[in-house]
Amino acid sequence: MMQLYYTFCQPERSRNGQRGFGVRAATPGLTRNQECVLLAHVGYRLPRDYASNTRPGEAPRRLALLNTQAGRMLCHSSYAGRDMYGCAGNFFTHALIDVPDKFAAAAAVATWGSPQWQTSDGDVSADLPELDDLPRGNPLSKPALEVFASKNTPLLKFLLTGMLSLPADQRLFVVAPPEDVALAINCLTRLLPPGPLVDNLTFSTYESDPLTCTARIVGTWWKNPNLDLPSACYSSCGLAFNSISGRVSPAAVSK
């Protein structure tokens, strides 16, 4: 697997020699065409109701397994606060490209919280090595997952029902903290029967604009109970579950 770092760069630290958001480092051999495709999926923005002075550790993290025209991609995006010029909105994305089929959703979501995900710029080489394995997360014990499942039964029921009933091109939108989305996907991969449903599952634990994400399960988050998903998330584009307001697609409730 090839790697890519994307963040706000100074000219001397950018691969294109320009100031601004760009590729900080990448594995040699990544083609220009592959890079252009991947850059459409590496963006990150804070939730709508988060202030510009939000600290990096307070912001939601994004872990996404996506199918792209350049192959399967697993990326981790984290908020980096202000850039070197004092402007808010900086972020750092560490992406893995051409992820092998053997690393399905269960293996991908298990990288949640791994210290091997790069989360900030620093003294790194512009050329990154190829990887044979995914970043190693902290595997959760079966009792820990059982506790999570017992406290989040409605969310798990929504995801399980949606996965079993919706066509493959329909999405499941979830308003919940990204760590809860990751845990729910971890549980879901254990509950679903082996086969295409699990093998082809894609996800994102957080998207600022969920309708722009093509993953099967799309997470998003905010703190204001008066905010909500676009109406299309609840009907025409799939099914939705809002853990803050309790709103759920009528079709999901009736199943």
Image (tube, helix red, strand yellow):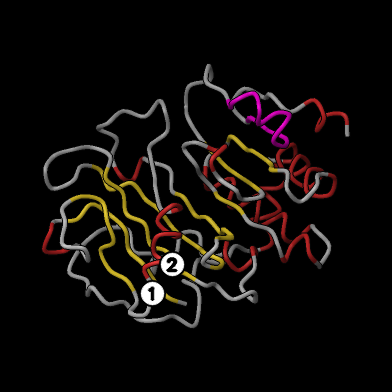
User: Nearest the camera: 53 or 13?
Assistant: 13
Residue 239 lies in the magenta stretch: yes
User: Nearest the camera: 167 or 129?
Assistant: 167
89 lies left or right of 112: left
| Residue, far front | 33
User: Nearest the camera: 235 or 29?
Assistant: 29
Q: Residue 77 shows which numbered tag?
A: none
At mark 2, the secondary structure is: helix
Marks 1/2 in contact by CB < 8 Å: the verdict is: yes
Q: Position of residue 174 (x, y in %)?
A: 62, 38
94 lies left or right of 213: left
Q: Position of residue 59 (x, y in %)?
A: 38, 41
Q: Amino acid at mark 1?
A: Leu
Count residues near mark 2 (Cα–Cα under 10 Å), then give few for <14, some for 14-19, many for 20+.
some
- Give the residues in magenta: 229-242
Tell me the quarter of the image containing the C terminus.
Answer: top right
User: Residue at the location (73% across, 43% down)?
Assistant: 170
User: Residue at the location (46% across, 37% down)?
Assistant: 208
Label 1 to label 2: alpha-carbon separation: 6 Å
Residue bearing mark 1: 30
User: Residue at the location (63% across, 29% down)?
Assistant: 242
Q: Residue 34 shows which numbered tag?
A: 2
Q: Is residue 117 above or below residue 131?
A: above
